[in-house]
Image (spheres, coloured by chain):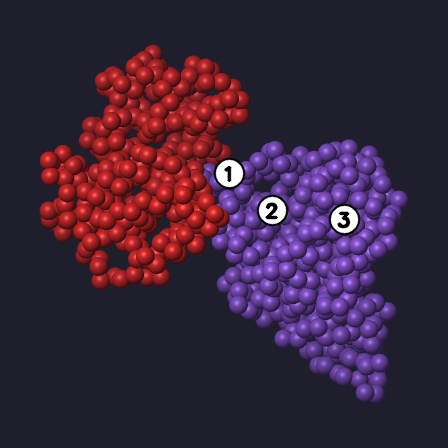
Chain colours: A purple, B red
Amino acid sequence: MSVTVFSKAHIVDPSRGVDEIGSVVVDGRKIAAAGKAALNQGVPEGATVIDCAGKTIIPGLVDARVFIGEPGGEHRETIASASVAAAAGGVTSIVMMPDTDPVIDNVALVEFVLRTARDTASVNIFPAAAITKGLEGREMTEFGLLREAGAVAYTDGRHTISNALVMRRALTYARDFGGVIAHETQDANLASSGVMNEGLYASWLGLSGIPREAELIPLERDLALARLTGGAYHAAKISSAMAAGAVNRAKTDGANVTAGVAIHNLSLNENDVGEYRTFFRLTPPLRAEDDRLAMIEAIKDGTIDIIVSSHDPQDVDTKRLPFADAAAGAIGLETLLGAALRLYHNGDVPLLRLIETLSTAPARLFGLPGGTLKPGAPADLALIDLDEPWIVSESGLRSRSKNTCFEGARLQGKVLQTMVAGRTVFSA
Amino acid sequence: MTDASSLPLFPHRHLLGIRDLSPADIELLLDRADRAVAISRQSEKKTSTLRGRTQINLFYEASTRTQSSFELAGKRLGADVMNMSVASSSVKKGETLIDTAMTLNAMRPDILIIRHQSAGAAALLAQKVGCSVVNAGDGAHEHPTQALLDALTIRRAKGPLSKLIVAICGDILHSRVARSNIMLLNALGTQVRVVAPSTLLPSGIDRMGVIVARSMAEGLKDADVVMMLRLQRERMEGAFVPSIREYFRYFGLDAEKLKAAKGDALVMHPGPMNRGVEIASEIADGPQSVIQEQVEMGVAVRMAVMEALLDPRRNHEGRGA
């Protein structure tokens, strides 16, 4: 068993509240030690010692909302290509959405994903199963069998379940098997033909708007059902101050509720749509600056538990179109950390809290290994230079699709090395 | 036209929207259009300004009026005009806008006129082709030549626009004509009012530089110009307003409602009209109506725009990709 020692590193491990200079000792697939105390331990014979002075080690990111094109859309992204992109972004675990073709709504598909991941992926891939068959919002999938096969959560991906009874039953039934119901909420009637945030900017562009209420109304319904059933509910991608307020009230009431936010809604606002830039057509849409600031506040006060990339690869055939005709979604695995670190560099969110929302909290929420550097945990980690600036360029991104919102953006914080279960899967 | 070299150079390569134009740009186009009106009224209507130039009309939405206006404008300037009939082309077979644009671009036209149902389509096209692009209407975004022809019609009848009150009435929400007109009239300092049922007003209308009137009586009071907008039939059968009858009762322009405006107020409509829905026939055909003049000004404005974009003084610029 080979031993690697990352010595004199700045260790940030939210799972133990550690933020100190120390050493991380990786023994085989696991972490043997991580912290100040490990600095003075002897180095075992034959160990590889890496001097990490000035560098930072964090538990690998756990990205809990990633859309991948395999099966069915391999030209956009495969499990293998997504995992290469993830590794380059310091992401060691992915929760993969069931919006594939065919849909991940049965045991065979879960097994397909896990088998393909085992054979081709360099990071951990955890499939989430559909709540309803075919993502149609009607009949429940086999929660128990899916969970046994390896599905880590239930979600209808991009789809919102409009039928309250279906949602009630899903929340109730899921209790028996564990596993969170993760749901994106957008009322289809209220959102109608909307393609960006409703407001003055959309009005001048002549684009139909999506009001914040389209997110809030089904979310409020879900939160009420979570209270009613006691089921574990995760508001997967909230975008507005009013949605954060609703989640906060539900949490205060003691409901079993958590929330996530896409990195785009923390980094950008509706003005970034500019002159019909289709890469900025997202669901939920980029909102006003006030909403973005409210999302940051919600990260700080704990209303929002996790940050996700909502990585959604789209090809030119779905993006090189007039804005209203283009598909929604942007890639994000490789820029998640750099974009999130803006919040740290700006002084908005402390580093420990930020890494918690990117790694420790999503691992805990979805019951995944990782998200920690405590001894005995799998050695899923990223060695980063917190301060190194870099400029995002489409050509440098490893994802098979290039629909990034951060083309040309200056980010600060670069991944130097990524390790999954003790194996180096990326090094700069 | 004679002696266009005395006019300032138009500083834009495309006409994608009124938003990009300064008040001086607008006045320049209107001045040029005044000269084009004179040409259109001669018996010899053909000039050689754009001789040897190729104009392609790419209309994704059927439009007899605007398309023929652009076609006639090009022909009067001596250009070779080609109409791409989208209904019978490969576009129906799923070719994307950009692929069509690239194909047309390879034919080396000098100017592309595009109408498309999606906002931003003209701007997207302009990024991909090497020639000038004129937006002839993109979704609910802009229809700049309509706003220019409206302004020309008003200016010729009423003088400087800065002293006037213009009421725009009807489906503001879905109207590119309304957006372009609001921007143009704001740029020239006109007081703009909008009148519509609240379901047909866009979000943020109160911050678009207009006065939102609650009724036709309020909106038309002392107005110099009343602009009516077309209301699509499918929008007045319960979706945005309950019925044609109710819409006409409160928002249709009839003799009674028109009394609120100045006695010599102009009545305008971009066409095609729904008689008895947004406008009564007696008004549309009445003495205050300048709807036919608008059509005439349309040809002149489009001549002016194409001449300005293809100004021979800019020939050395060459084609960019």
- Mark 1 — residue? A208
Mark 3 secondary-structure assignment: loop
Q: Nearer the viewer, residue A292 or A124?
A: A124
Which quarter of the rendering shows the C terminus of chain A? bottom right
Q: Chain of mark 2?
A: A
Residue A234 visible in image: no
Whichever of callouts 2 and 3 sits on the residue coming sooner in the sequence is 3
| In front: label 2 or label 3 | 3
What distance separates the C-alpha of mark 2 from that of mark 1?
14 Å
| In front: label 1 or label 3 | 3
Q: Residue at x 79, y 41 (%)?
A: A140
- Using the image, tell me which numbered label, if any, was put on residue A188: none
Q: Could you tell me if the residues under marks 1 and 3 are in contact, i.e. CB atoms within 8 Å? A: no
Q: Chain of mark 1?
A: A
Q: Amino acid at mark 2?
A: Thr
Q: Amino acid at mark 1?
A: Ser
Are both tags, 2 and 1, on one chain?
Answer: yes
- Using the image, tell me which numbered label, if any, was put on residue A283: 2
Q: Position of residue A317 (x, y in %)?
A: 52, 54
Q: Amino acid at mark 3?
A: Asp
Q: Residue at x 57, y 45 (%)?
A: A285
Query: Within 10 angstroms of label 3, few (less than 14), some, or many (20 or more) residues?
Result: many
- Mark 3 — residue? A105
Relative to B251, B191 lies left or right: left
Which quarter of the rendering shows the N terminus of chain A? bottom right
Q: Position of residue B212 (x, y in %)?
A: 42, 27
Relative to B198, A358 lies left or right: right
Q: Position of residue B303 (x, y in %)?
A: 22, 43
Q: Could you tell me if the residues under marks 2 and 3 are in contact, i.e. CB atoms within 8 Å? A: no
Q: Could you tell me if the residues under marks 2 and 1 are in contact, i.e. CB atoms within 8 Å? A: no
Q: Residue at x 23, y 53 (%)?
A: B53
